[in-house]
Image (spheres, rainbow, N blue to C red):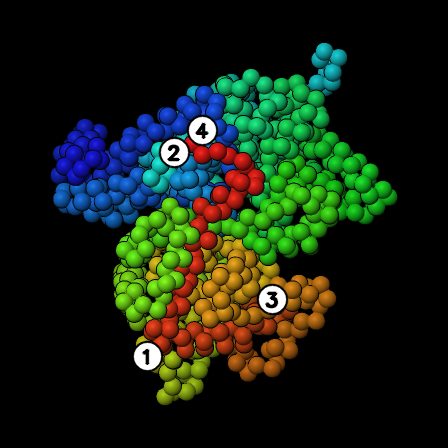
């Protein structure tokens, strides 16, 4: 079907006409997209069946990666790339008068995630399949993913995401593999064969129906599965007719929306329901598959590894216990041993507001049997602690899983798994020495680091094909399977020819983004300006505010010095969604847009300075924006960003980082050195010491800086639109609340780092060399490396 252009064209036309019952010439983009999608699915079906057969016939150990988010973005382009048929399809369609990029644009992003955590899970799936490991994802099929963001009068407005509107070509619904998930009801105890047994009665049963998405590896025959669970009414559930509507509504709501916030625990019962729904459905189906081939449940951990991505799927631990105890008749000790040998856990954050704690009053009625098991886990855990630390009540209280009327999910995760990892060395050290120090003292062997990564296939080969080609011409294409080989570029960083080509490609990508901005926002940006980009979720700790304050200071400087100009013209590009209930974050969006309007409209500044806010930041926009970036803004308050992965995508595309010593910035910095990174700001120890010992006074920095005073005045006196109160929350955060993210503290250092950026950019050979050094050192940050580390140290998988 994809052997050559002619064969593809014939198959494409035939299929389109038979499926849609119309002449090819009359087909719409949607029909063309769907035809191509189905053809690809058909193309991989043979390998997919073969892979599923292999699972059923025993063989290799399987990994299941449980995550409440998978931010996979579009799949057409990445599937074409991984299957090695992009060129044939592109040429074939072009002859038919169809543009492949246009067809690709038709696909809606599957926005089944908020940001970094979900995107990491998606990169891991790509690497697992590309490295030939049997590793599968399990998630919820949210009918509405992360909200669609539009900017109206400078404010963020949220619309429901409609990714399923045109149907979804990549999924296969498998109703025959549905399972039941139980909520509410009561637990009855009874004696069975002389043992105490537990029965969950009067439960509300929901049907979990899976839809499977094939996950295609790059140049391999491995096709793994991403399984998305949909909640549906159970026809076997008995409900009174009058309650039928309520039951249906309650069921549907479980998988209706993705929660638009991964840093707050909303305390919503629905969120807890989603979490249990995901793990219960996943475990049922994992064990069912396992038992098809293996006789005893006691060997589960030898054939299955289950990974818990952050605390959201932690209920997998008590749920597996429940299955082993209540459905397979194992004793507690055996069940606990199997569970803790099967499960591993990644911690993603030390932000205290993100550490999930569920009030017992919500937890117990919704999940009565699971609650009993969690209590038992807690009691045994505390007893073991007591033996180890006799009399140390305080320590035991701090470490307890159930305490002060809440269930602490992170504590359950550490107690119930054999491996706990952080996502960058700094983050893991903070976990071990501070946040989870007591647990580290108790079981140091569990703790390890796995520095995050990104798939270089999507983020370089797919997003920036010209750069990929240029690299291949120089060093061959070994780097595609073994990204460490990008190191070979180091020999060419001074090569003027390569510098020129890299420059030309960057300019081409900037032109492409500039065209997009022109079309979408009717703003002309100068492609010879520095494209300085900050795209990520909007959050206090990520400090978009620091970036805006600096832009205002540039603007003020130009206005006050009528004959001055910037060292280089600059375009500041933002993309960021704020959680709908995050008030200050939304004010920062408003401020960015207000500054943009002022700066872009002022004849004095508009030729030197532009500010662009791109709406609805998502994976596909990232693929457009990142290859066009000169400067990557990674300016979080040190100690707050566990790793970051945006930073890696930019580096791989030759952008230079202006950043703090935070998360994986530290590791980027260590690889490229001081000369190829614009480092500034407080170090994590300084930040942590401020938090611990006090000593920071934001007012002091305000009083000592006329530049900051002027900016704060402008913010509060209506210079950027609105009333005096518009930006009150920002003023309060920076001054009244003593600037918890140290924006004012780091302002001067940031400004100076930005001056270094301008200086370097003015010297093209210098800049191009720095850029190439970054690309040459980016191979380490491929998720292929990350996955190999997980496999070796945690999951112990074999290649297919
Ligand atoms: C990579 C990525 C992120 C994570 O970005 P950070 O800068 O690490 O926070 C978030 N959203 C999308 C769409 C991404 O592609």
- Dot 4: within a 10 Å radius of its alpha carbon, few (fewer than 14), some, or many (20 or more) residues? many
N-terminal of the two: label 3 or label 1? 1
Q: Tell me the number on the disc at residue 603.
A: 1
Asked if residue 232 is positioned above or below residue 161 in the image, the reply reads above
Query: Which image quadrant: the N terminus?
Result: top left
> For mark 4, what is the residue?
210
Mark 4 or mark 3: name the one nearer the start of the chain. Answer: 4
| Image location of residue 733, percent across then percent down | 60, 66
**Percent coordinates x, y for residue 37 in the rendering:** 28, 36
Residue at the spot of label 2 = 222
Q: Could you tell whether 411 is left or right of 548 in the image?
A: right
Of discs 4 and 3, which sits in the foreground?
A: 3
Q: Residues within 10 Å of mark 1 (few under 14, many from 20)?
A: few
**In the image, residue 598 above or below residue 145:** below
Q: How many marks?
A: 4
State the image coordinates of residue 112 (x, y, percent, origin top left): 44, 43
């Amino acid at each position: 079907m994809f052997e050559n252009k002619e064969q593809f064209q014939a198959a494409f036309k035939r299929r389109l006409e038979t499926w849609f019952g119309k002449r090819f010439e009359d087909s719409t983009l949607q029909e063309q997209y769907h035809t191509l999608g189905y053809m690809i699915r058909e193309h991989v079906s043979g390998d997919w069946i073969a892979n599923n057969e292999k699972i059923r016939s025993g063989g290799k150990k399987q990994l299941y990666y449980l995550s409440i988010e998978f931010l996979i973005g579009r799949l057409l382009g990445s599937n074409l790339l991984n299957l090695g048929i992009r060129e044939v399809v592109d040429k074939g369609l072009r002859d038919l008068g169809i543009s492949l990029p246009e067809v690709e644009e038709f696909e809606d992003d599957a926005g089944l995630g908020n940001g970094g955590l979900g995107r990491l899970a998606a990169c891991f799936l790509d690497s697992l399949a590309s490295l030939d490991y049997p590793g599968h994802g399990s998630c919820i099929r949210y009918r509405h993913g992360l909200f669609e963001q539009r900017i109206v009068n400078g404010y963020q407005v949220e619309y429901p995401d409609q990714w399923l509107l045109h149907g979804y070509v990549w999924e296969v619904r498998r109703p025959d593999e549905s399972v039941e998930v139980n909520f509410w009801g009561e637990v009855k105890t009874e004696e069975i064969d002389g043992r105490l047994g537990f029965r969950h009665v009067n439960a509300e049963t929901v049907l979990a129906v899976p839809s499977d998405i094939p996950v295609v590896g790059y140049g391999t025959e491995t096709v793994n599965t991403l399984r998305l669970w949909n909640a549906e009414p159970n026809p076997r559930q008995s409900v009174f007719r009058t309650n039928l509507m309520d039951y249906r509504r309650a069921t549907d709501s479980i998988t209706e929306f993705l929660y638009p916030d991964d840093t707050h625990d909303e305390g919503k019962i629905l969120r807890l329901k989603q979490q249990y729904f995901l793990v219960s459905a996943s475990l049922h189906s994992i064990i069912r598959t396992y038992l098809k081939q293996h006789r005893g449940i006691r060997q589960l951990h030898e054939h299955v590894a289950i990974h818990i991505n952050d605390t959201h799927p932690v209920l997998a631990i008590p749920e597996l216990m429940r299955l082993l105890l209540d459905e397979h008749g194992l004793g507690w000790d055996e069940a606990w041993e199997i569970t803790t040998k099967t499960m591993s856990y990644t911690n993603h954050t030390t932000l205290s507001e993100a550490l999930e704690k569920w009030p017992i009053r919500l937890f117990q009625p919704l999940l009565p049997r699971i609650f009993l098991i969690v209590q038992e886990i807690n009691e045994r855990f505390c007893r073991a602690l007591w033996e180890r630390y006799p009399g140390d009540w305080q320590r035991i209280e701090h470490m307890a899983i159930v305490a002060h009327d809440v269930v602490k999910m992170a504590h359950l995760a550490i107690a119930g798994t054999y491996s706990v990892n952080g996502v960058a060395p700094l983050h893991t050290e903070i976990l071990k020495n501070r946040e989870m120090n007591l647990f580290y003292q108790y079981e140091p062997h569990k703790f390890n680091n796995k520095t995050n990564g990104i798939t270089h296939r999507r983020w370089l080969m797919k997003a920036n094909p010209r750069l990929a080609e240029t690299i291949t011409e120089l060093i061959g294409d070994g780097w595609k399977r073994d990204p460490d080989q990008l190191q070979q570029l180091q020999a060419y960083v001074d090569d003027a020819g390569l510098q020129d080509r890299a420059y030309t490609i960057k300019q081409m990508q900037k032109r492409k983004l500039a065209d997009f901005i022109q079309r979408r926002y009717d703003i002309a940006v100068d492609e010879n300006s520095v494209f300085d980009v900050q795209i990520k979720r909007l959050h206090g700790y990520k400090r978009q505010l620091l970036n805006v304050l600096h832009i205002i200071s540039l603007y003020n400087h130009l206005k006050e010095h009528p004959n001055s100009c910037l060292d280089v013209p600059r375009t500041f590009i933002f993309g960021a969604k704020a959680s709908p209930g995050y008030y200050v974050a939304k004010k920062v969006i408003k401020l960015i847009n207000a500054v943009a309007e002022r700066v872009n409209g002022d004849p004095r500044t508009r030729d030197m300075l532009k500010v662009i806010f791109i709406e609805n930041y998502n994976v596909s926009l990232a693929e457009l924006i990142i290859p066009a970036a000169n400067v990557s803004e990674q300016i979080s308050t040190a100690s707050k960003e566990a790793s970051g992965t945006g930073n890696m995508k930019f580096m791989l595309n030759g952008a230079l980082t202006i950043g703090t010593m935070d998360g994986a910035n530290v590791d980027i910095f260590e690889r490229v050195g001081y000369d190829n990174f614009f480092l500034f700001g407080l170090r994590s120890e300084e930040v942590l010491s401020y938090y611990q010992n006090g000593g920071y006074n934001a007012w002091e920095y305000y009083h000592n800086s006329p530049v900051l005073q002027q900016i704060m005045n402008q913010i509060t006196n209506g210079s950027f639109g609105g009333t005096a109160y518009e930006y009150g929350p920002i003023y309060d955060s920076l001054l009244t609340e003593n600037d918890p993210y140290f924006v004012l503290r780091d302002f001067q250092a940031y400004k100076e780092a930005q001056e270094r950026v301008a200086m370097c950019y003015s010297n093209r050979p210098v800049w191009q060399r720095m850029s190439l050094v970054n690309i040459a050192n980016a191979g380490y940050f491929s998720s292929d490396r990350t996955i190999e580390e997980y496999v070796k140290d945690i999951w112990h998988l074999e290649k297919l």
